[in-house]
Image: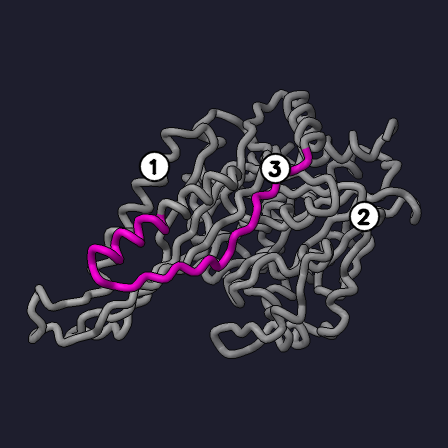
């Protein structure tokens, strides 16, 4: 066990391209940048040291494969190494690291699989650079509309197409990364929880049932800009004052629905834009962004309907116009129940306590699940902090995750399968 802990500590640093994990500014490896490529190269070197064959597909995903037989089924595991700006060193990396560690465990025990095993280090999982997430896994699973995203720009005006080509990949071939259903048999991802449910339920690991995809609303209130010093209070059409109560309404209604339902829902007014946003001008236009998440899709739509009804009341009372634009309304993704059952069996067999839960955050697994039986395993992260330099997962929990993946792969690819 000490050997595994030391190996995890060493290779956690290598994947993060650092000599120590305590970085006050965190880690910035944005999609299709040289920093992401350097971490991909570290992944390749670690995989090769384990005797795996490494390749890069047309979307920039890295593959490391333990090939038994070319025509044998392939069980896949993996995650990503790109980060948000000034993020943590465990989101994504934990899944890649533990997948590699699982192969080390199997090889150290001289296990001989009957199926091929592939580790996928996905490209561009985070939306931090372009506002578009999971580009690599969408490419593999055939969900990427490359013509739609090609012109999307980052803060410096670089398009996704340009970034991918700068990464060394021909844009016209990105779609060729798509695999058929026969190319993989299953997929498993490990990730830090990014919450505290595992800890709150005194469990060792979380086994995810479903991924809560969001409804995202853009609510625009239009009043009339005017001078703050000369416009009487009874002659104002202040868009901000009119729409402001919606912020508390969203929070209150989400809490109310949670008291009425077993499946949780979360909702956040997470962005606000004021026009003209000048100290001496009454706000004439305000746009709020609202993010609603639950694996219960009807519950998400119930809250969206309540928001629409409340906005109509605001219009009638405050003489402002409100327009609601639905930016995203994706159905939630439920993961394969057989994979969930096998993960539960493996975890309990190892003397660990699993906790069945849902994920409020999106992951590569939600794309892979559209085509292959897929599962998602969570390990705890301290205080639920993520996308932040203080993000932390213990080596002990990384080791538990590695051992569960190893045992799962042993059962999936060994005798009798």
* Residue that mark 3 sits on: 377
Residue 171 placement: quadrant: bottom right
As drawn, is 56 to the left or to the right of 153? right
Residue 246 visible in the shown view: yes
Q: Nearer the viewer, residue 254 or 187?
A: 254
Q: Is residue 334 magenta?
A: yes
**In the rendered image, the vertical position of residue 385 relative to residue 354, given as above or below:** below
Label 3 with label 1: CB-CB less than 8 Å: no
Which label number is shown at residue 242? none
Which label number is shown at residue 255? 1
Residue under the image location 88 percent in, 36 percent down:
114
Task: Name the element at disc 1.
Answer: helix
User: How dense is the environment of label 1, judged by Cα within 10 Å: few (below 14), some, or many (20 and up)?
Assistant: some
For the record, the magenta segment spans 307-336
User: Given this view, does label 3 or label 1 mark the residue nearer the observer?
Assistant: 1
Residue 243 placement: quadrant: bottom left
* Residue that mark 2 sits on: 181
């Amino acid at each position: 066990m000490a050997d595994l802990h030391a190996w995890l500590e060493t290779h956690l640093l290598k994947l993060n391209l650092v000599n120590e994990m305590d970085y006050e500014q965190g880690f910035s490896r944005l999609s299709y940048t040289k920093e992401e490529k350097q971490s991909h190269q570290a992944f390749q070197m670690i995989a090769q040291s384990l005797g795996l064959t490494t390749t890069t597909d047309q979307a920039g995903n890295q593959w490391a494969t333990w090939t038994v037989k070319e025509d044998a089924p392939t069980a896949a595991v993996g995650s990503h190494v790109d980060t948000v700006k000034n993020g943590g060193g465990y989101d994504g990396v934990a899944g890649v690291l533990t997948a590699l560690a699982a192969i080390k465990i199997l090889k150290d025990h001289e296990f001989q699989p009957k199926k091929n095993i592939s580790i996928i280090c996905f490209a561009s999982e985070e939306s931090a650079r372009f506002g578009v997430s999971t580009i690599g896994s969408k490419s593999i699973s055939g969900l990427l509309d490359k013509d739609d995203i090609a012109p999307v720009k980052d803060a410096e005006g670089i398009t996704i197409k340009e970034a991918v080509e700068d990464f060394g990949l021909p844009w016209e071939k990105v779609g060729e990364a798509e695999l058929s259903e026969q190319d993989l048999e299953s997929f498993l991802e490990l990730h830090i929880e990014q919450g505290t449910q595992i800890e709150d339920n005194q469990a060792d690991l979380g086994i995810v049932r479903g991924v809560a995809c969001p409804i995202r609303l853009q609510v625009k209130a239009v009043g009339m800009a005017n001078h703050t010093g000369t416009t009487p209070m009874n002659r104002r059409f202040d868009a901000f004052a009119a729409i402001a109560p919606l912020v508390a309404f969203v929070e209150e209604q989400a809490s109310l629905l949670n008291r009425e339902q077993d499946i949780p829902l979360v909702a956040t007014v997470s962005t606000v834009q004021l026009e003209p946003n000048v100290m001496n001008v009454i706000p004439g236009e305000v746009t709020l962004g609202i993010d609603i998440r639950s694996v219960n899709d009807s519950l998400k739509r119930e809250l969206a309907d309540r928001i629409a009804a409340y906005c109509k009341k605001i219009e009638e009372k405050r003489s402002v116009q409100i327009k609601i634009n639905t930016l995203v309304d994706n159905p939630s993704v439920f993961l394969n129940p057989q994979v969930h059952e096998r993960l539960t069996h493996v975890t309990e067999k190892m003397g660990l306590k699993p906790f069945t839960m849902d994920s409020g955050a999106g992951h590569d697994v939600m794309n892979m699940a559209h085509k292959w039986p897929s599962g998602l395993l969570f390990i705890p992260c301290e205080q639920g902090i993520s996308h932040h330099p203080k993000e932390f997962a213990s080596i002990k929990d990384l080791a538990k995750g590695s051992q569960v993946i190893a045992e799962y792969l042993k059962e999936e690819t060994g005798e009798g399968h």
